[in-house]
Every structure is written in C-alpha cells, then in structure tokens.
Amino acid sequence: MRRVIVIVSLVLAMTGFMAVLTIEHHLGQGSVAVQDLSFSGSLSSPVETFGLGMGIGTIALSHGSSAVSYVPLYSGVPLIIGTVSVDKRSDKNLSLRDRIVAEISENPGIHLRELLRNVGCAMGALQYHLKNLEQTGVITSIRNGNSKHFFLSDFSSDSQILRLVALMRNPTVRAIISKCRANGRVTQADLSRQLSIDKSLVAYYASALVESGFLKVVPVFGRERPLTLTEYTSSVLCELGVA
C-alpha cells in the first residue's frame, strides 16, 4: 500500500512539472491564444500572473467582458486564460454623468423629476452629479416655482430665454403660446374652448405668462381682452426654431 502511495505521489509530481514546462514552452512561442486582451483601466499593467493549481496561469483584465478561453496542456490540466470584468465605481459614475449630460442636451429645460425618470437612477446619485456638473460649468439651471430646470451652459446666457423654454416644457403653456402665435390674438375663453381646458387653468397659466413678459393683453373694449405674444417672445421662438 505504501509503495502505491509513493508511486502515485511521484506521478502527480511529474505531471505538475510537465505542466509548468509546457506552459513556459507555449508562452515562449507565443502560441497561447488569449481572448480579448483590451484594457482601458488605470492599472500599471493589464496582465498579471498568478498560481493556478500546479501550474502558472495568466489573466488579462478588461472592462465589460467576462469571456474565458481554455488551452489544453500536455498533461491534461487546462490553463485558463481569460478576462475579468473590472467594475470601477468611477467608471460607473462617468457613464451616469454622460447619460445625464446627453439627456439635458436633448431636452433643454428638463425638470428634475422628468430627468430622474428618463435617466433611471437613484435621486441621490442624480443630485450629486447635477451639483457637480453645475459647479464645473457644464450645465446651468433655473427655478420655476417648485421645479428646477436644467440646460447645458452654452444653450443661452439670457435667463429669460431659459425661463421661456422651461415654461414651454409644460404642454398647456406650449399650447397657449402656440395658439397665440398662430392666431395673432386670442381670448382666454377661446383658448379654453379650443384646447378643451378649464377656464380657471387657462387663466392661471395666462396670468403667469403675462407676468413673465411672454404674453401681453391687448387693450380693447369689452369684457374679454385677447392675449398676444410679446415681440420678445416672437423673436425668441424664431431664434430657437420653435414651430
């Protein structure tokens, strides 16, 4: 029995020794095929060596991949050479940051809640990046009532333009401005009827737009005073290419 154990031990030792020699031979000839050796991290070297069973293996680090290649050795022991996905918190943050910037670029004047829905992240993470982006001058924001609206910093330096675009994110406001622009002048009663909106809601938004300087009341005789766009609003809409 002891003799059998000794023989088995010797066979295992020789097998391990042959495995090491075979690996070194393959590496020396450059014949080991490694799948996906691309690396975009900040490590000093993307390739590291580590002990694998009785032999020596090589592992390549790569973002966004988990593929593994197997190279059979002489001794029947496989050498595993593959890629390990590196999940860096900073890279995830950069990805989220880019998504936020892209969303604001595509939707100037987007408000916080809408941005949260579109990006699909935690509120805390969103607020962190928005604060950082605003501090570094990438984006700017304005507040309209309880809502905060975001723009890229190079969208416009005119705060009134930013306010108008932010207000027009509201479909009712946009419809009122569109009707005034199309008709030249229109009464609140006409707006209520044409848009199928309650008169009180029309009055609320119309008053806000008049107060902000985007609409003006046309002085005429009678109870119903029509609304029309100010010259400033007309020029801004033309400048922005708003249909």
Image (cartoon, grey):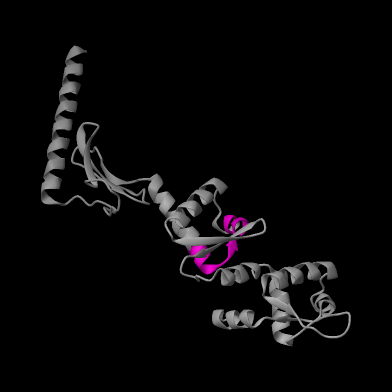
Q: Position of residue 204 (x, y in %)?
A: 78, 67
Q: Position of residue 48 (x, y in %)?
A: 22, 41
Please name whichever residue, 222 or 233, is drawn nearer the observer in this view of the structure: 222
Q: Quadrant of the C terminus?
A: bottom right
Residue drawn at x 17%, y 18% is 6
Residue drawn at x 43%, y 60% is 137
Is most of the magenta stretch helix, strand or loop? helix
Q: Quadrant of residue 217?
A: bottom right
Q: How many marks?
A: 0
Residue 114 magenta-highlighted: yes
The residue sitting at the right extreme is: 223
Q: Is residue 242 visible?
A: no
Q: Specify the segment rendered in magenta.
A: 102-116
Is residue 242 left or right of 153 when viewed as pictured? right
Residue 208 magenta-highlighted: no
Is residue 26 left or right of 37 when viewed as pictured? left
Is residue 159 left or right of 4 when viewed as pictured? right
Task: Please tell me whether residue 225 is drawn above or below residue 75 in the rendered image.
Answer: below
Please name whichever residue, 46 or 187, is drawn nearer the observer in this view of the structure: 187
